[in-house]
Image (cartoon, rainbow, N blue to C red):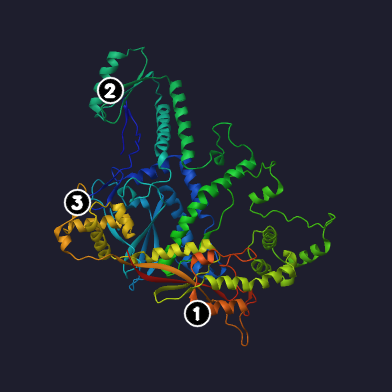
Amino acid sequence: MDNKTTISNIQFNLKAMPKLTFTVDSKGFVKYGKNNLYPQELIRLYDEHPEHRAIIKRKARYIWGKGLKAVNKQDEIKVNAFIDNFNKKETLNQVGKKISENTEIFNGQFIEVITNLNGDPIEMYFLNSANCRLSEDAETLYFSKDWNKSNNFQREITEISKWNDKEKQIGTFFIDFKYYSATASRLNSVYPTPQYQSIVEDVNTDIAISVANSTMVNNGLSMGKIINFFNGKPDDRQIAIIDKGFKGTYTGEDGESVLIVHSEKDDKAPEVVDVTPTDMAERFLYTSKRAQKKIFSGHEMAPELFNIKFDDSFLTGSPDLLTLQELFVKGYIEPRQEDLLEFISYLSFVKTGEYLEMMFEPISLIGADLSNDVDLTQDERRKLKGYEPLKPVQMDINGQPVQAEADEYNEMLTGLSATERNDIDRIVRKFKAGKTDSPDLAIASLTAYGFKVSQAKKFLGINDGLDAKMSSQVDKVLMALEACAIDDNDDDVLLIEAAHIHNSKDALKYERHIMKFADALVITIEELDNAILTALKGNPILTIDELATLTQSDFTKVEESISRLVKNGFLEDTSIGFKPTQKALDKPTEPIVSDEIYTVYKYDVNPEKPSLKKGGSSRPYCQKMMSLSKTKSWTFESLDNMENDLGTNVWDYKGGYYTNPDTGDVDPDCRHLFYAITKRRKVKK
């Protein structure tokens, strides 16, 4: 809450940061802070503290970067359509600048979803978290443009229901996102906790010091003592009586001056502090410096990135600045980007029915001083400016330049832009350093720039021996795939998607998305209630945690189920546990039979690729895989545990690279890919 501190007869506002507490309002929403204005206080800290504001803005710029783009070239049209048509007024990249800043202030975000008359989401809008409150079950959002008004009747509050993927809905809904933070109770977890929550008091203290300094300078104040009365905020008449009575008794015409402070009411006795103007300045300087150190620490950002040094013990040179930047990006920015990208991919699913794979295009490092970079190497300077390191001249065994290869290479580069040349250099370097899994991918990447296959192999150092090895291993890979394939069954098929999976990380990410899609299918409310009653009939002292484990359900859902059963007279809440009533004993219940959702993979034709030409045929590897996929499939574990002789993963291993007959483009994915088949089976628990 606001705390108006009065000093003598001169008043200035020192805001005491309210504690972050949560209670349920009679209107139905959870109060965000004691007076429901904690988000507004976070905005105040952002507005009034320059370093705190600058840190948040820099984090937001790093996270959103130059904006979103498709990870895979084949998805560019769909991704760009989603980005450009986020709503009628703004693209997603325009909205994203607000989202990234909002999530850094509040650690979460609300998005408004508007459907057409068919219930199809057509527009999405950014909602400022400061205007949003949630119900206790987080299923209803209460939106108000001004929560500062004194009571609910004066506010204009709009209630918005949460978006539900499983039901056809028409109207306006909300989708929420929050970064995880540990909480002590379910009520405390309704709202996201700011990432910098541990240092909000320090930010507020530093603001208060600036206000106090400014007030004393503007009013020419000096003092010998500070006396703090913890008597609350008296009115002007009481202030005058206290000032007159105290100063008339304890100070004289030539006596030292006294600063009388009236602070928030407490049971403490008045506090007397001896201080001179010099002491006050030194105390303020020490406290401010200490607060700022904690602010940078709480934000997980090195002060050197803002050209601030608190002592001489930290890194000093320009290369160290680059190291700090990279540590910050790897340790803070990239993990936050990963979570935010999952949320944005979910938004694409809501609007398009497909989880689009996107990435943030990174921006160059901020704050590096390129005018004073004498300590950097040439490649370090190029890296800071966003360029690839220079390609070294190739030497023969005698240390002489390899002229013939260099001439041929330079001829191939003629007419290409500097960016394209850098890309080609990077492809060659990564392959020779062993950082590219697939030779086919490296070859295809070079042929896309006009290299012939023979030239690409030459520059990559791929010889006929390697080609022979690639050919000889096909049978080994097929044998291993045939051995670990599983027979198809009659389980219900829920979803078939061309997964575009190239590694285990892609597969896990896809399956996490599928679990979100399938969550509502796993168990019904009635099934869960019956299962919990069955379990408690056998053992009435089971805890909620134990019931959640037995039913393989979320703790919150079990808690809600017990509340329903108590309310409907099936359970009695006793000191030793939840005791089934006679009504429950008379009710027939059965063990839970729920839906288990799982994913398997099949090899099939990529519909985005042109059909085979008349008389053409697929490679033997693809023919065999297509034949196996008619009656068999593979699990994530079986594919992920395999590795072929070249050291590449089976997810990415195809029959060979593919030249599109219509465009001439070379693609390492041939004409086939793994399809993800999401299925459902009934399981007793």
The residue type indicated by label 3 comes to Asp
The residue type indicated by label 1 comes to Lys
Q: Is residue 38 above or below residue 410?
A: above
State the image coordinates of residue 287 (x, y, percent, origin top left): 44, 29
Identified at 39% across, 63% down, the residue is 516
For disc 3, the neighbor class at 10 Å (few under 14, some 14 to 19, many from 20) is few
Picture quadrant of residue 305: top right
CA separation in Å, label 3 and label 1: 55 Å
User: Is residue 514 in sight in this rendering?
Assistant: yes
Residue of label 3: 573
Residue of label 1: 630
Which label lies toward us, 2 or 1?
Answer: 1
Which label lies toward us, 3 or 2?
Answer: 3
Do the numbered discs 2 and 1 sit on residues whose CB atoms are within 8 Å? Answer: no
- Tell me which numbered mark, 3 or 2, is placed earlier along the sequence: 2
For disc 2, the neighbor class at 10 Å (few under 14, some 14 to 19, many from 20) is few
Picture quadrant of residue 22: top left
| Mark seen at residue 269 | 2
Task: Answer with left or right where residue 441 lies relative to residue 251.
Answer: right
